[in-house]
Image (spheres, helix red, strand yellow):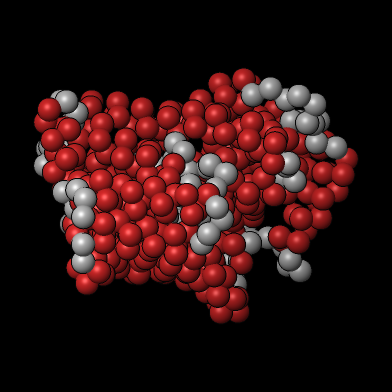
Amino acid sequence: MINSSIAAILGLILAIILIIKKVSPVYSLMLGALVGGVLGSGSIVQTVVDMFDGVKSITPAVLRILSAGVLSGALIKSGAAASISDAIVRCLGPRFVFLSLALATMILCAVGVFVDVAVITVAPVALTLAGKLGLSRSKVLLALIGGGKCGNIISPNPNTIVAAENYDAPLSSVMAAGIIPALLGLAVTVYVLVPLLPSRGDACSGKDVLAGGESVAALDGPNKMPSFLSSVAGPLATIMILALRPLAGIVIDPLIALPIGGLVTLTATRSIKLTSESLNYGLSKMAPVAVLLIGTGTIAGVISASDMRNVVIGWITNWNISGIIMAPLSSILMSAATASTTAGATIASASFADAISATGISGVWAASLTNAGATVLDHLPHGSFFHATSGSVSMSFKERLRIIPFESLVGLTLTLSTLLCAAVL
């Protein structure tokens, strides 16, 4: 038997190796938790108890994430998501094409669409514009991803829900705390990073115009896309309901608010007949995340049961590291390990929330910093986001690798601006 914190780290390293080797992330995390727990405690029985405790701690977040599938599914299947992105791109026009694409994915993520789904949804429109204007495929994808990351820190998406839950902070307050960093991140993405990214002859062609046009038609379906106002009705309803807690002291849990937003979306867009299809689609997108969270819960339980929190507290005390630094640093490391925003935010907040909160930082800012930090390295190649986004614009593996440093700079911008806001506000 070895030191429990070292054992937990070894278990996490084992999980990372298995994930990189293409083993299921859920089983990799569970096996890493089991090995780390047994090495640290010497007892399989105690390790299993710790794993169960870890899963129990994130069960409320899992339920809220599953309920978020109602809103996400309604937005996609009703055509509301496509309508929102199309309206933004048409409004800003070709002159501000990168801003319009980034803003479209940002808003889609902000209203509850998964970041990879948001990129895939806007990609057909992006390909059409890029083909007509001869734009770089890499620059287009960076704009889409950068906007998605900015929207992800102000959204009722799994990463935000988990961070708010583990720090016992109102979800609406955590979402609001990310608004200024998200706007700064959007500006840096469009006006600094996209121009800096070298094109190297990867301009979109006429084939991309055709492919993009066909994809947009497929997204529209047999009926015309709903209006912009009807499309945003559901997300606005959700935000208003969540805002009742900080504004009026009326607590309505996201478990209720998110499905209400989905039903409002279906009603406003006259898509009630698509209710079953929307629910099935939303569940199909959220179920893998919920299962992944169970895996992350097991290893978070083992980490929490180890003396790693005492080690973290020792670092904070001896090295003068405040919770304002530890919150994003822990999620950066954990998201890099899992190549997942949700898994990174979950493990970091579930494992170190007590130690970080003990430094005096508020739950809202701790959750916001954890959330922002999880966007810095969540796009590494051993995760699904890397491959889903490259496929959305038909990009090769080598081309996709070139964008990683720029994506990380978007995440760092979000993290540093959130740090600045936490220190000043």
Image side of residue 42 versus residue 108, left or right: left
Looking at the image, residue 3 lies above or below residue 178: below
Quadrant of the rendering where the C terminus is positioned: top left
Q: Quadrant of residue 417?
A: top left
Looking at the image, residue 176 lies above or below residue 319: below
x 13%, y 35%: residue: 314
Q: Quadrant of residue 96?
A: top right
Foreground of the two, 275 or 47: 47
Foreground of the two, 36 or 288: 36
Image side of residue 334 versus residue 361, left or right: right
Foreground of the two, 272 or 2: 2
Say whether residue 261 is visible: no
Q: Position of residue 244 (x, y in %)?
A: 26, 57
Q: Position of residue 68 (x, y in %)?
A: 43, 64
x 19%, y 28%: residue: 321
x 60%, y 79%: residue: 273
